[in-house]
Amino acid sequence: MTRGPRLLARYDTYRSEVDWLPLVHARALPDGAVERDFYESIKQELLTGLRESLPLGGVFLDIHGAMTVVGMTDAEGDLASAVRGVVGPDALISASMDPHGNMSRQLIAALNLATSHRRSPHEDAALTKQRAVANLVACLDQGVRPRKAWVRVPVLLPGEKASTRDEPARGIYGRLSSVERLAGVIDAAVWIGYAWADEPRCSAAVVVTGTDEDAILREARGLAEMYWNARTEFAFSTAAGDADWCIATGLSSSERPYLISDSGDNPTAGGAGDVAFMLERLLSHPALSSGQATAIWASVVDPSAVARCVEAGEGATVDLRVGGALGQDIARLGHRSLERPIYPLDPKMTAPDLAPVIVH
């Protein structure tokens, strides 16, 4: 939790010559769903701060875009809509986001400007915030009311298949800077979406903002078609396979240490982190079960098992059951099903309607 001067200091390197009023910033490492009470408390704190600060020329929302809140299916859409309700239609709202967030129609409808990182891994996170702030201030200075062309691309990829160091993501994201330099265009952004949230909004999306409606519609469609046409080309940036294949490959390799990871873009994909499947597969391999080879397994979340180890003391031997300790908590959150079609990665499939819309 960050507030006041400490919050303002986070943006010292790219604040413009305007009066900034820091309100509240809350973040957590990738984990499970946010409890509804906590979300509502932070939301109300933000809205109260906005009301006390009125009138405002603009608002900068520094958000990720893939927050899941218990009982909700579009947390950022809800948050941005509530902010819009307080500041009114005349204030400009600019958001900087992660491309692994979800750009729903509700969210873009509440915003005037939106941009996201153009590199995965996100080496340009600070530049994204700087661009979002600069665009906001420039529009305020020049009296510009941006138009927004939004299109949902019905492809849902795991983030680790869309590194911008590799094609096709490299070419798609590499095109954005040239699009934003076109006359009548302010910014262009592509969202990969967040596969693990299992919400209707989860999908790739394109947003192009600017003052020339024809230009932003044209460029948004071009980027959406580029993404759709490349959908079968996205792949892992490293060797990948199931658990047994990974273990066998590691044991046969002469390189040490040999690391196997299933963390992907988001450790545990928002789950509890208490799945013992990999441990079971390690113990099932003859070389490891016999002691001929060794492996370090890290890690699993199991508070009671940790407590027993601490109680036994360093160097002691204990028999433990591990994994599945948090299953009931996860089940309590429930599961949601996608309500909109996500197309299979079939290169012969007829393209869906990728016509962008101007969102008001």
Image (cartoon, rainbow, N blue to C red):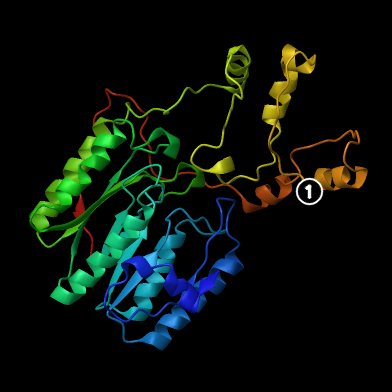
Crowding at dot 1, Cα within 10 Å, few <14 / some 14-19 / many 20+, comes out as: some
The image quadrant of residue 121 is top left
Query: In the rendered image, which residue does mark 1 sit on?
Result: 303
* Residue found 39% across the figure and 45% down from its top: 193
Where 18 falls versus 168 (above or below)? below
Q: Is residue 129 visible?
A: yes
Q: Is residue 332 above or below residue 293?
A: below
Figure quadrant of the N terminus: bottom right
Please report the residue visible at 42 percent of the width from the left and 74 percent of the height from the top.
8
Q: Amino acid at mark 1?
A: Pro
Q: Quadrant of the C terminus?
A: bottom left
- The answer to whether residue 352 is visible is no
Q: Position of residue 331 (x, y in %)?
A: 67, 47
- Which residue appears at 70% of the width and 22% of the height? 282
For image coordinates 32% across by 66% down, the residue present is 14
Residue 209 point in image, percent of width and height: 20, 58
